Amino acid sequence: MTNTTVDSRLFEPASLGALRLPNRLVMAPMTRNRASADGVPQPIMATYYAQRAAAGLIVAEASTPNAVGQTYPDITAIHTGAHVAGWRRVTDAVRAEGGRMFLQLQHGGRVGHPDNSGLTPVAPSPIPLPETVHTPTGPQDAVVPREMTLDEIRSTVADFAAAARNAVDAGFEGVEVHAANGYLLHQFLARGTNRRTDAYGGSVARRIRFTVEVVRAVADAIGPERVGVRIAPGLTVNGIDEGDTEEIYPALVAALADLGPAYLHVVFADPDQPLFQEIRKAWPGTLIANPVLGWGKPLPADGGRRQAERLLAAGADLISLGRPFLANPDLVERLRIGAPINQVRDHGLMYTGGSAGYTDYPTLAATAAVDHGQASESAAL
Ligand SMILES: Cc1cc2nc3c(=O)[nH]c(=O)nc-3n(C[C@H](O)[C@H](O)[C@H](O)COP(=O)(O)O)c2cc1C
């Protein structure tokens, strides 16, 4: 091992709202489907997140703010007392290890299925996801979602605000509103999924309105310094076709900036993209950038550190990493000393229950102890 400590801004403290972060590495939100069927976080989740408490900030996985927003089986939720109690176990465990957590709030919109939520999914327009949706009986064709009425839009905004209050009651420092990756807010932003002719569809100003209203309501509920927003400009995942990416995001970022949230979180951020640079210039607050590490490929041997440094140099304040944290509970230490990283062992274990591929990734210390034990055994032979 070439374990040399290399100076880097990644390991410098940073502030975020009222929080002091010990380093600039954020664990990106990752759905792991380890909740009960009705969305209650299970005790094993406390172990998983506490193992990763050295992150400057953990953004916990997408959690649904109401029943119809549920995407897949066994994902977490935050709209009942049982959800709050389940999450409280997790935040207590992370705090005991010295960590800090936000919770991501995600409404799936058309990315859902009656077999998962018991309800017909809702969306800006009745356009089905052009893919299958994972259900307890396997992948199934997506159903045609029901177009949201104006009353449903208002009540969904209120559900996000209530979910944010629940998250604070559950011990989170704040919430991240998920406006990325093809879920409900992204469906409103994108021309391909939003064919409305009322105040929430048509022009860019109207398509960003729902997201702005959600963020405003959440900020009013818990304070803007406790709110982040995740966006994915240009991402086509979940059948998204934004149409006018270059107009949507400058307008959205300007409108969000007026609300003063703690951070903006950009997915698959590329410092060479003019839109990334434009967003950086327009955003007055903390910018979290999630670098492109190569989807579907092995993780880079340096755990993403080179891309992280590039994004810091391009103006990002904090760097979020997903799979490197999934496979390396002690990722911060590994990056700090340039130690080798664990690869994701089995992609099939990402979204299944149980401890395999979840809480059993070894730390450097655990690997060293095993190596030492094996060395002692062979010495005794
Ligand atoms: C298992 C898994 C689950 C994910 N779940 C979420 C999620 O709940 N919310 C979200 O915004 N992104 C989710 N993502 C995307 C990650 O936050 C991140 O953007 C992506 O993994 C790219 O970062 P990486 O290359 O560092 O892994 C997920 C990714 C993985 C691998």
Image (spheres, rainbow, N blue to C red):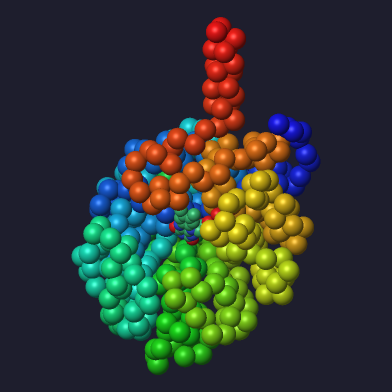
Please name the residue shown 71% across and 59% down the image. Answer: 311
Give 283 or 124, whichever is nearer the viewer.
124
Vertical arrangement, residue 378 with respect to residue 212, above or below: above
The percent coordinates of residue 201 (x first, y second) are: 44, 87
Where in the figure is residue 64, as x and y percent of width and height? 35, 60
Q: Residue lying at the far bottom in this picture: please name it.
A: 197
What residue sits 61% from the left and 40% below the top?
Answer: 341
Residue 359 location in percent, x, y?
Answer: 44, 37
Q: Residue at x 49, y 36 (%)?
A: 361
Q: Going by the image, does 39 lie left or right of 365?
A: left
Q: Is residue 282 above or below residue 25?
A: below
The residue furthest top is 380
Q: Position of residue 249 (x, y in %)?
A: 59, 77
| Number of marks present in the image shown | 0
Q: Is residue 163 visible?
A: yes
Question: As drawn, which residue projects farthest toward the front?
Answer: 381
- Which quarter of the rendered picture does the C terminus lie within? top right
Residue 20 in view in this figure: no
Q: Does residue 254 appear left or right of residue 75 in this picture?
A: right
Front residue of 13/291: it is 291
Residue 1: image quadrant is top right
Above or below residue 108? Residue 197 is below
Q: Residue at the location (51% across, 46% down)?
A: 344
